[in-house]
Amino acid sequence: MTVFGDDLTEKFNALLTFLTAMGIVVDPTTQGISDSEQAMNYDSPR
């Protein structure tokens, strides 16, 4: 038994995926909505 139905969970996950792909969902662990200068200068992931 789940708190929400599987159908509702799937729709919510699809919505979050869409919003993330559009850049609407922002990473709460960083300040602001853009990458830092340090991150922008990476040649490869660390």
Image (spheres, grey):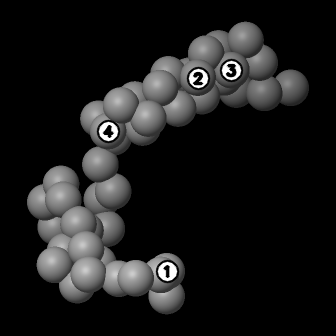
Q: Amino acid at mark 1?
A: Pro
Residue drawn 36% across the image and 31% down it:
22
Q: Earlier in the sequence, mark 1 or mark 3?
A: 3
Instruction: Between residue 42 and residue 17, name the one nearer to us.
Output: 42
Residue beneath disc 3: 10
Instruction: Check disc 2 and report the residue beneath it.
Output: 14
- How far across and how far down the image is residue 2, in percent? 78, 27
- Please identify, in this view, whether the residue under mark 2 or under mark 1 is nearer the observer: 1
Image quadrant in which you'd find residue 28: bottom left
Q: Could you say whether the residue bearing mark 4 is in a helix, strand or loop?
A: loop
Which residue in the structure is indicated by mark 1?
Answer: 45
Q: Which type of secondary structure does the marked residue at label 3 adopt?
A: helix
Q: Position of residue 15 (x, y in %)?
A: 50, 22
How far apart marks 2 and 1 lie (CA) works out to 27 Å
Q: CB under 8 Å between callouts 2 and 3? A: yes
Question: Quarter-wise, where is residue 40 in the image?
Answer: bottom left
Nearest to the eye among marks 3 and 4: give it. Answer: 4
Q: Is residue 11 above or below residue 27?
A: above
Check residue 23 in the rendering and tell me which mark sits there, or answer none.
Answer: 4
Which one is in front in this view, the residue at disc 4 or the one at disc 2? 4
Mark 3 and 4 residues: CB-CB less than 8 Å, in contact?
Answer: no
Real-space Cα separation, disc 3 to disc 4, in angstroms: 20 Å
**Element type at marker 1?**
loop
Task: Judge whether residue 34 can be spotted in this image.
Answer: yes
Q: Residues within 10 Å of mark 1 (few under 14, many from 20)?
A: few
Image: 35 above or below 23? below
Q: CA distance from mark 1 to mark 3?
A: 31 Å
Q: Amino acid at mark 4?
A: Gly
